[in-house]
Image (cartoon, rainbow, N blue to C red):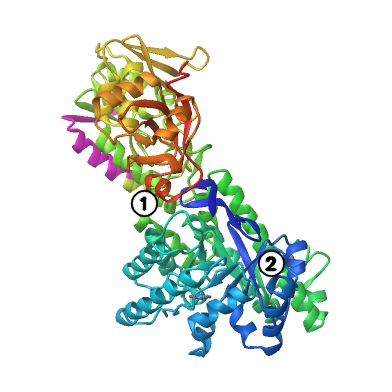
Amino acid sequence: MFEVVKRDGLARIGKFHTRSGVLETPALLPVVNPKIFTVTPRELYDEFGFRALITNSYIIKNNADLKERALEEGLHKMLDFEGVIMTDSGTFQSHMYGEVEVTNEEMVQFQKDIGTDIGTVLDIFTEPYWTKEETAKSIEVTLERMQVACDMKGEMMINGVVQGSVYPDLREYCAEKMATMDVDVHPIGGVVPLMEQYRYLELVDVIVSSKKGLNPNRPVHLFGAGHPMILALATLLGCDLFDSASYAKFARDDRLMFIDGTFRLADMQSLDCNCPACRGHTLESLKKLTKDQRTKVIARHNLYQITSELALVKRYIREGRLWELVEMRCRAHPALLDALRRIKEHSEFLELTEPISRDGAMFYTGVESRARPLFNRYEKRVMERYVPPTDKAAIFPDSGKPYSRAWAAEFDKVRRSGYTPIVISPFGPVPADLDEIYPLAQSLFPKLTDAETENTADALTFDFIEKMGFVEVKEYDEIDNDGTMEYDADQLRARAISNYQFGIEATNALFRGKIDIVKSRKTGKIRNVISDGEHILSLRAGDGLYTLRAEGAARILASVPSPFMRVVVNDDSVPFVSEGRNAFCQFVLDMDPEIRPMEEVIVVDKNDKFLATGRALLIKKEVESFKKGIAVKVRSGNGDEA
Ligand code: GUN
Ligand code: ZN
């Protein structure tokens, strides 16, 4: 069973429950060669804190001595490792050396017999140079073998390997089929050659197309990925598990892994590493060690690089800033930069799980930052949902934030002349009324703009002006006549934010009769919106977006048809949610597919009766697939509305 504890887009910190304990993800499983322990499993557990490893059942089966011991005492005892043990099946050997002389049934049975926690089907490794026909055919064989493996697995968990070479449609097809089977973990296979050849751009397509077909409630393993350099990127795209044989392989070749690449000891100019393995060493002292001793030191160094990067990836997920780490990491190599740039092609898919807001500010690290789905989302929403209060626009350059403070006097002046102030920001056009919402105010850009972002912002603003149908557009400083038009900035702002957040139809339902705005005496910011004497919305200071109140929810339910903003729960859940308890996945019957993580939602019963308001933590596809976990963090139910 896999539980998501914290998420950041597709990336997640999870708890994977196995019979050998709970494994926190993202996790990397060091590959242990059962014939030679470069670092012993005991050390991996005690010294490095690895709670899972992967070894090869095919190698064990083909060695009389190991086979006998494994069958006799079991894998855990043989390796002296009490954590989670995953085994591979011999597929990789067939990739390296050609056909293997075992059957899928034999391998699955053997893995069961030696007590592996997570076994692997004998899948067919789809090479990147294969034709589409060849690839498609072999996938059918892998799928047949997978069904057999599922039928045989018993208490053992099983890896359902997604294959499909570099063909995204075949990847997605294979993933979809695997998702319907009783599989426990989904490795994405056949990617080692891509990584060896630095084909990270294609790796992005392979991961995303596989993720599209898979079931979100199962961990995804990127088979053979263990370089610290790509952990952040692969985690961002939704991979939970990794494995590394390189830490030992590279060590035997005197190669050291670092976050910015792999370096030969002979080529290195200095040893600027403070890991516990390198501490006290210099290049010279390392070179003077015996081959065996040196391999051990370098293998440990490589493992420390991996563990420290994984810890950092987790920290960035917890802080909701994994994009930033990925953008930094992908500058280590041009091929990684290609991967980062490629992500933009998938922004529609990534937008589905992109939270409505995050804690803390977004840092722009370069033009690639514009690939983040929050840019796309803003562009789309502002184009579709903004309703200009006048038919003339005044254009302002980007300046200090929030814009309505930085340009207070100028905004007022143009408004009195009937112009709607629009700032050209790196996000594109920002109408004055939206300047405090996430991510517009909660973002930092360099003062010296790059040409690409500037051009994009200009082009977007041009499109926006057309779409809004402004009849007159002027630079703000060309408007010199002091007008006398009256306007209420708070009313305009309150409504514009609602349009942006909930859409025009819901806003028309929410805002009716007399609108009173309650502002904070300290900050002067909008706090509450009262309509017809009833409190419908509260504005959050952090992200400048609304929290929906019960009365607001009731108005939306009455006017906007289901499934808009709804999460429907079954009868068992009704009394709990009404009391303000969270709505759990297993009780959800239906949900608006447009809901995004952290979005305001209305929890209703099967008759569309109001139960509670809250914020969604998961999207529909996730809620449907998870058997455990919170779907909606409920704020207050109908039973206890204050
Ligand atoms: N190890 C690395 N890649 C693969 C793969 O595609 N399948 C299996 N079973 N093991 C692997
Ligand atoms: Zn080191």
The amino acid sitting under disc 2 is: Leu
Distance from the alpha carbon under mark 1 to that under mark 2: 39 Å
Identify the residue position indicated by label 1 in the image: 452
The spot of residue 476 in percent (x, y) is 30, 27
The spot of residue 489 in percent (x, y) is 34, 17
Q: Is residue 47 visible?
A: no
Identify the residue position indicated by label 2 in the image: 303
Residue shown at the point (84%, 66%) measured from the top left:
280
Q: In the depicted view, which residue is nearer to us: 320 or 581?
A: 581
Q: Is residue 37 visible?
A: yes
Q: Is residue 313 left or right of residue 540?
A: right
Q: Is residue 392 left or right of residue 187?
A: left
The spot of residue 67 in percent (x, y) is 67, 84
Location of residue 223 with respect to 630 vertically, above or below: below
- Looking at the rendered structure, the secondary structure element under dot 1 is helix
Q: Magenta segment range?
A: 457-476
Mark 2 or mark 1, which is nearer the start of the sequence? 2
The amino acid sitting under disc 1 is: Glu
Q: Is residue 458 magenta?
A: yes
- Looking at the rendered structure, the secondary structure element under dot 2 is helix
Q: Badge 2: few (under 14), some or many (20 or more) residues near its Cα, within 10 Å?
A: many
Location of residue 146 with respect to 463 vertically, above or below: below
Q: In the depicted view, which residue is nearer to us: 516 or 640?
A: 640
